[in-house]
Amino acid sequence: MTAPDPAPDAQPAGGVRTASRRAYLLMVAAGSFATTFGQQRALGNYPILFHLKEHLHFGKEQVSEFFMWATFAWNLKPLAGVVTDAFPIRGSRRRIYMLLGGLVAGLSWVALDLARGTYGAFLAASIALNVGLVFASTAMGGLQVEAGQLFGMSGRVTSLRQVVMSIAQIVTPLLGGVLAERAFGLTAGIGAAVMFGLAALALRPFRETSITRFAGASDGDTAPRYRPTPAVWTGIAVLAAAGTASVLVRGMLNVGISLFALLGVFLLVLALATARVSNAVLKQAQRQLAQILVSRALWLAVVMLFLVYVVPGLNTALTYRQSDDLHFSKELIGRLASVEGATGVLFALVYAVICRRLTLHRLIILAIVTNAGGTLLFLVYNAATAYPIHAITGAVGVLSELALMDLAVRATPVGCEALGFSLMLSVRNFGIALSDVTGSKLMDQAHLSFATLVLINAATTAAVLAFVPLLPRALVLRKEGETA
């Protein structure tokens, strides 16, 4: 049975009125665009990459490690989720954090231009930039989940987010390829203007879902706190062992440190799940985290998300191949990336239609199969095939991203939208960062060819299919708009 869409002005339990569907979608769209466009891996990708390559003489491995640490704040999104969910500022859990995040990110873009001659200061400004982006993005993610759950449109709001992000991904490579040939101050100025624009938009009135909507659920709550199981302690030990082994292996220090940082984030989440708290939203978070921590099916879903994104990546390796082996100009490299964004827009619109006709289970299978198959096209990558390959991989990449983000929206607990969604996205973000570093190291240290890296990427992506049958049935065996 298909559930009818709520009225334009939703009125959740307790009679708390919220903003209209249109207002939610406007804020989600604006936040998605700004926090995508303003990223170092978007607008700043080529200007910064070629600055490191040509002025600081960094190799593939050093460049990928710079981006890993610069963007590491994205792995800490659960902490930003806790802050935005549980600690409203003047009654706002979303709009004010978008405002503050936009201001911090805008100022950091200015600082990047001032610090470009000193690597340490440049990295510090990059970290500050990503902290601001994380808070703005986390607040936007909370609005996305609220809209999806309030109006029964998780697939469509996810599709809207992807359309806007894909538009940014069309513009930024084209612009970035041009900006890479010009003074860095121009890149910094554009990035600052976009983030200050988001902050200005966040100043407009917006009726958020009140935190009091969730307070009653925790009144009189006497349920025992979560206690970690042996399986959880085993997982902690495995992650610690992997981090230790990486630290001891020559050339893997940064990977080891990042694994320990991920372990630290997980321990903080575990502490939240077990601590004595009085905050209503934190109590709600504890109950939902306890359900996740004891659910084998949900942990398999998290493992699947991680494995999809952690496969040895081609990002930096492909850029070096384009520049050094195929001698593509920077503007051509930017145009090719924009082709991926263009097909991404198209297939995001397609997903908005097919998510109401196919179950999420089928969409995830389709996404993984086409993603693995599309990767194999890079085996024949050259000047003649570059445009169609980027068009195809852009399409299948967006299909995969949307299916997984649809799963994340459905799995996020009510009342902890920013925290729950951030937990999912932190797995994604860490996987992407580690993927790029791993791919670059396999080429630089293990001396694997680009073709071998492509085969490894495709094979490990296809292997994720083994986890699909174990996903929570209540989440994936229904179409968009159907009741669970």
Image (cartoon, rainbow, N blue to C red):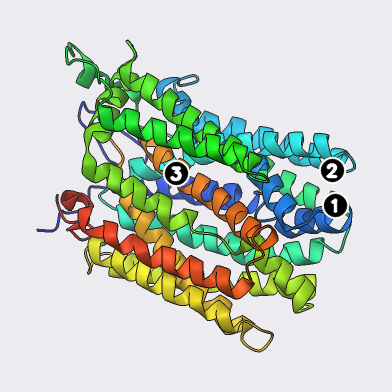
Quadrant of image for the N terminus: bottom left
Residue at mark 3: 427
Tell which of 281 and 315 is nearer to you. 315
- Can I make out residue 93 in this image? no
Count residues near mark 2 (Cα–Cα under 10 Å), then give few for <14, some for 14-19, many for 20+: some
**Mark 2 and mark 1: span between their CA atoms?**
6 Å
Q: Decide which of tag 2 and tag 1 comes sooner along the chain.
A: 2
Q: Position of residue 426 (x, y in %)?
A: 47, 41
Tell which of 166 and 324 is nearer to you. 324
Asked if disc 1 and disc 3 are in contact, CB closer than 8 Å, the reply is: no
Q: For residue 476, what is the image quadrant? A: bottom left
Please identify, in this view, whether the residue under mark 1 or under mark 3 is nearer the observer.
Answer: 3
Asked if disc 2 and disc 1 are in contact, CB closer than 8 Å, the reply is: yes
Q: SS at mark 2?
A: helix
32 with respect to 60 (left or right): left
Count residues near mark 1 (Cα–Cα under 10 Å), then give few for <14, some for 14-19, many for 20+: some
Q: Decide which of tag 1 and tag 3 comes sooner along the chain.
A: 1
- Can I make out residue 45 in this image? yes
Q: Decide which of tag 2 and tag 3 comes sooner along the chain.
A: 2
Residue type at tag 2: Asp
**Mark 2 and mark 3: span between their CA atoms?**
31 Å
Residue type at tag 3: Val
Residue at mark 1: 184
Q: For residue 159, what is the image quadrant? A: bottom left
93 with respect to 203 (left or right): left
Residue at the bottom extreme of this rendering? 384
Q: Residue at x 37, y 72 (%)?
A: 350
Residue at mark 2: 113
Q: Residue at x 60, y 49 (%)?
A: 34
Residue type at tag 1: Phe
Q: For residue 235, what is the image quadrant? A: top left
Q: Position of residue 374 (x, y in %)?
A: 47, 76
